[in-house]
Structure formats: C-alpha cells, structure tokens
Amino acid sequence: MTDHRTSSPADAPAPVARLRSLRSVTLHTPHAAATAAFYDEVWGLTPVERDGAAAWLRGTGSEHHILEVREAERNAVGKIVFSVGDRREVDSAARRLAGHGVRLLTEPTALDQPGGGYGLRFPDPEGRLIELSCEVEAVAPGDPEGRAAIPRKLAHVVLNTVDIEAACAFYTRVLGMRISDWSERQMAFLRCNTDHHSIAFNQAEWTSLNHVAYEMTTIDHFMRGVGRLRHHGQVPLWGPGRHGPGNNTFSYFADPAGLVCEYTSEVDQVEEDTWLCRTWRRTPELSDLWGTAGPPSAQTRARMAGIPDPGTPGGRT
C-alpha cells in the first residue's frame, strides 16, 4: 500500500535533485587496517588507493570506489554518497536544500578525494553525512564478462533509526526517493532508480548502521561467493536465503570491525508506472522465502543493532 504520511504537501519545496544511484559508503572503525584487508582479500573488492588512515576499494563495476574504510575511534557510518547528473544539479541542490532548511557542511566544490568529482555535503536529520556528487572518475569494468564471484556494486545500506517516519519523510521529500515497500512499520525500503531499494530504514532504539549489502552479478556468483567466504572460515550470520521485500537473495557476515556485510543478488526491478507499494507481514516465511535460513538469531540482531552513532561532527539537526 502507499504511505500518505510520507507524501509531500502540494506547497512543499521540491526534492533537491534526481538521485541516479547509490555510489559509495564510508565506514569508520578503530580496526581500519584489518577491515580493509578483509574487504580486499576475502570479500573480493579491489583497493584503488590507500593513505595512512583510509583505504578506498572498488567492485567490478564502473564506480571509482564503492567502499571507503577509515580509521576512527568507534564504528560508524562516515558518509553515504549518491550520484547526480551534472554540476548544475549539484548547484541547484544547494539552493533547494536551503529551501528545506538543511544547512550545507560542504558547499558545491571540486572534491579533494580519490576519484575527484564535484559535489556537496550535508547532514540528514540523524547526523549522517550525505554527499551528492557528479564527474567522479569512472573506471573500466574489472570483469566485463562477469565471471568472478565478487561484488559488482554497492547494493544498499540499511540504517537503524529512532524515528522511521521522520527518516522516510526526509529521504522522500528532500532527496526525492520513493518508498517501494514496508515491512509492517518496522522497516521501509526506498529506491532512487529501478532497484527495489538502495536505502532501507529499520526502527530501532538508537541511530546506527544495520548493514551494507553488495550486489553479485547472478545467483550463481552469489552462491560461489558464499562458498569462497566459507573457505576463508567465514560462516554466515544469517543465510543463504531470499527476502520477501525486494525478492533479493541474502547472506550476512561480520567483518573484523563487527560490522555486518551482505552478499545479495536478483533484487526486484521497479517499473514506476505499475509498481504498487505494499506492507509485508513480519514472519519467518516472508523474511526468507526459501525457508533455508530461518529467522535471524539473537546474535545476528545484536550485530545489526550496532552501537549508537553520534553522526558527523556538527551534523545533528
């Protein structure tokens, strides 16, 4: 069903931009070196640049990088990056953010970071740092025939929120995302392109990262990737299975920082003119349509709860 509480009033400011895709995520952790090594040597990403405190890693797609791992005092989301079309859209977004009462942390500028680009940064209502960027350096696909059982791109980021209604309102009204489905009123799945979801929110006791998912090319790549992790001694926290909302396969693991990462494939593709948002019941049968994984364990839920994330400095609104 559609959700009228997150629809925009007729006189509300327009969304700030048309988001093209989820580009990358930054993870903060006190265990940056071990975590970056895991995503390189076990998970399958390729390092593109390192400095003393951070590493940038790519998948097999065209994005310069899909993951940044940075040394910090505690586990947290450092930054979530979305792509937009061009500089005019970035500049327009800056003006429109002001109309929504959102302050910029970085004005539109050339970005001094690996991959470069042009963009801006601002906080969401719970202090997460959001970047909108264009002209980021693209790279040739690393495996154009898709033979390697390694991630192609960033699939989605799931965020724990203390107010799911407010989170959805911001990401739909300000960022122009659309709600694809609900899991009762516990989770909401939001899209910015044809992928069923690139951001999802989970109602929780505190703001934190739930997990980050990486897309495998096919279900065969997905299963071979799970098998490779098993050979490295990595037993899934939950999975393999197939979710109801999004219809995507899943297998969840924990990285050396204790952050949850997911292999996924075959996410639903949304046709805007025909898609109907629905509310799914929260049952074991619908959380795993295959019936192979069962419900998540208490340990898995605790991992996904993470620790409270205070947000980027100066980012709370």
Image: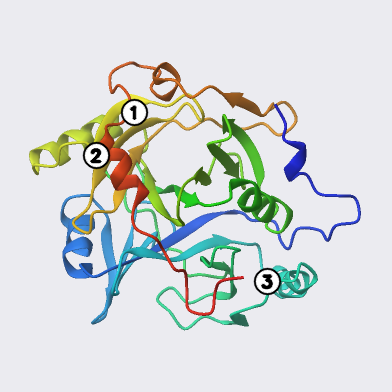
Q: Quadrant of the C terminus?
A: bottom right
How dense is the environment of label 3, judged by Cα within 10 Å: few (below 14), some, or many (20 and up)? many
- Can you say whether 227 is above or below 55 in the image? above
Q: Nearer the viewer, residue 127 or 292?
A: 127
If you read the primary sequence from the N terminus, does the residue marked by circle 2 or circle 3 appear first?
Answer: 3
Q: Residue at x 46, y 57 (%)?
A: 207
Which residue shows up at 20% across the image and 67% down it?
31
Q: Residues within 10 Å of mark 1 (few under 14, many from 20)?
A: some
Q: How many numbered discs sit on the rendered protein?
A: 3
Residue under pointer 3: 90
Q: Which residue is mark 1?
A: 219
Q: Residue at x 81, y 58 (%)?
A: 14
Q: Are marks 1 and 3 in contact (CB under 8 Å)?
A: no
Helix, strand, or loop for circle 1?
helix
The image shows residue 173, relative to residue 218, as above or below, that is below
Task: For marks 1 and 2, give the one nearer the viewer.
Answer: 2
* Mark 2 in CB contact with mark 3 (< 8 angstroms): no
Rounded to the nearest angstrom, the CA distance separating label 1 from label 3 is: 36 Å
Q: Position of residue 113 (x, y in %)?
A: 43, 79
Q: Is residue 60 left or right of residue 137?
A: left
The reply to whether residue 17 is visible in this rendering is: yes
Element carrying mark 3: helix
Q: x and y percent of residue 235 in the render?
A: 15, 37
Residue linked to disc 2: 299
Kind of residue sitting beneath label 2: Gln
The image position of residue 159, as x and y in percent, is: 47, 51
Residue at point 47% right, 73% down?
A: 312
Question: Label 3 amino acid?
Answer: Val
Colouring of the image:
rainbow
